[in-house]
Image (cartoon, rainbow, N blue to C red):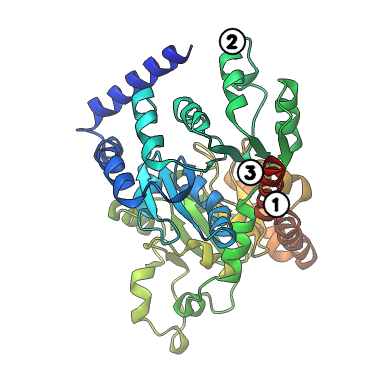
């Protein structure tokens, strides 16, 4: 089965190469992988102690980031190696200042695995959330690395638990420990004979809590809001924006709207401006003195990246995009500021969404009239709003501390091994 897996990896890598002339992401992966081994050779010496953290993309990196920084603080003698599969992670975080080396993960062939592990020679390996590259894992284990899966979450329909998943179940035994998010994942691992696991929670809670403490101020955005109630649409897509436009026809409560779209290319920004004629772009508000004029602008379009997590502080309600597509984006960044959260129906894979819906800190909808009713209820009923706000803030506070629990357990495990 290992060779079948390796053949699949070879075919997959060939497909990436074949589409690279026509696909920007594939082209970036091919180009980035060519530099991986030279970066390892130049950045890591044979005498270095190394902790390797792997994240599929930017979302997983942000999930693992608090653990990276906590590990670096606790073990400053280690060099930090960060790898990515996707350009969405590497291209944004290739200059991450808490890592000594940042690379694209090479194709998981047996040959590449041997070469990667020889150059990186990690003492500790951390795979974030759901990453299983079996040749690399097997090679790292053979060379004595301690291997951990962090913030893991599993579902019963995944291949580990199928009749044909025996080989994959066997490969999981190469992990020294699994730090999981919930009881279901722990029970699933236990059901296939894996007991070296512990519920430590989701490291993202540590990250968003830190973001809230270090949130930046944006005086011109605050001027735009002018103490009005505000709905902030974070990581919105076209369907989200069109639905909000429809909902505005039925809402009875006055509010201003901030739209921070998932894609900020010019054509999308202009599309939003057409949809909301009384809008202004963030790049234009520096030239407006809102203190000395009546604010005619009702919609602010954020045509900049990297500021959304701090902007939630100015919102009354957060609308998180993606719920009418592949799935909702990060809702925890809004929850940490105590903002009630709205999103579309595609949220089933996100535990935090289900948790907050059950607690009434978040609300899902399918149609624009449902959205308008939710907005009116939250913005016109102060007691109901405060209850939802407190639930969101409390949910974050209840779940922070995953990094401390993980590092404490790792220290305990390694002290035991050293006895």
Q: Secondary structure at mark 1?
A: helix
Disc 3 to disc 2, C-alpha distance: 38 Å
Q: Which residue is mark 2?
A: 164
Residues at discs 3 and 2 in contact (Cβ within 8 Å): no
Q: Which residue is mark 3?
A: 365
Q: Earlier in the sequence, mark 3 or mark 1?
A: 3
State the count of labels: 3
* Residue at image location 47% in from the left, 69% down from the top: 298
Q: Earlier in the sequence, mark 1 or mark 2?
A: 2
Q: Nearer the viewer, mark 1 or mark 2?
A: 1
Percent x, y for residue 49? 47, 50
Percent x, y for residue 114? 38, 29
The correct choice, above or below, for 340 with respect to 190 in the image is below
Q: Secondary structure at mark 2?
A: loop
The correct choice, above or below, for 113 with respect to 206 in the image is above
* Residue at image location 71% in from the left, 35% down from the top: 197
Percent x, y for residue 292? 44, 89
Q: Which residue is mark 1?
A: 408
Does any portion of residue 280 appear in the rendered image? yes
Residue 390 badge: none
> Residue 150 lies in what quarter of the image?
top right
Q: Earlier in the sequence, mark 3 or mark 2?
A: 2
Q: Nearer the viewer, mark 3 or mark 1?
A: 1
How crowded pointer 2 is (Cα within 10 Å; few <14, some 14-19, many 20+) is rated as few
């Amino acid at each position: 089965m290992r060779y079948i897996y390796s053949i699949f990896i070879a075919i997959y890598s060939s497909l990436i190469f074949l589409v690279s002339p026509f696909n920007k992401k594939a082209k970036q992966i091919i180009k980035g992988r060519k530099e991986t081994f030279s970066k390892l050779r130049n950045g890591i010496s044979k005498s270095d102690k190394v902790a390797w953290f792997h994240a599929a993309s930017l979302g997983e990196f942000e999930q693992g980031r608090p653990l990276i920084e906590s590990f670096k603080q606790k073990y400053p003698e280690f060099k930090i190696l960060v790898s990515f599969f996707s350009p969405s992670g590497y291209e944004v975080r290739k200059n991450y200042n808490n890592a000594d080396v940042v690379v694209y993960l090479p194709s998981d062939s047996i040959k590449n695995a041997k070469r990667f592990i020889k150059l990186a020679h990690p003492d500790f390996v951390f795979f974030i959330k759901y990453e299983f590259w079996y040749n690399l894992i097997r090679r790292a284990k053979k060379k004595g690395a301690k291997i951990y899966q962090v913030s893991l979450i599993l579902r019963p329909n995944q291949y580990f638990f199928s009749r044909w998943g025996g080989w994959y179940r066997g490969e999981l035994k190469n992990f020294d420990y699994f730090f999981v998010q919930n009881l279901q994942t722990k029970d699933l691992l236990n059901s296939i004979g894996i007991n070296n696991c512990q519920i430590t929670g989701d490291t993202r809670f540590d990250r968003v809590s830190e973001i809230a403490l270090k949130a930046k101020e944006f005086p011109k955005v605050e001027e735009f809001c002018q103490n009005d109630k505000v709905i902030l649409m974070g990581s919105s897509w076209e369907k989200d924006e069109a639905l909000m436009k429809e909902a505005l026809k039925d809402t009875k409560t006055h509010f201003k709207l901030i739209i921070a779209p998932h894609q900020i290319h010019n054509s999308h920004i202009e599309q939003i401006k057409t949809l909301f004629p009384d809008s202004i772009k963030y790049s234009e508000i520096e030239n407006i003195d809102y203190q000395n004029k009546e604010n005619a602008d009702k919609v602010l379009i954020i045509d900049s990246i990297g500021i959304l997590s701090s902007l939630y502080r100015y919102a009354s309600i957060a609308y998180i995009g993606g719920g009418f597509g592949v799935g909702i984006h990060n809702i925890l960044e809004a929850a940490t500021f105590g903002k009630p959260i709205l999103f579309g129906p595609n949220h089933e894979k996100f535990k935090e969404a289900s948790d907050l819906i059950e607690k009434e800190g978040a609300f899902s909808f399918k149609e624009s009239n449902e959205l308008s009713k939710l907005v009116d209820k939250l913005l016109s009923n102060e007691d109901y709003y405060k209850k939802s706000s407190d639930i969101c803030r409390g949910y974050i506070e209840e779940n922070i501390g995953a990094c401390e629990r993980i590092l404490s357990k790792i220290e305990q495990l390694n002290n035991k091994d050293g006895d």
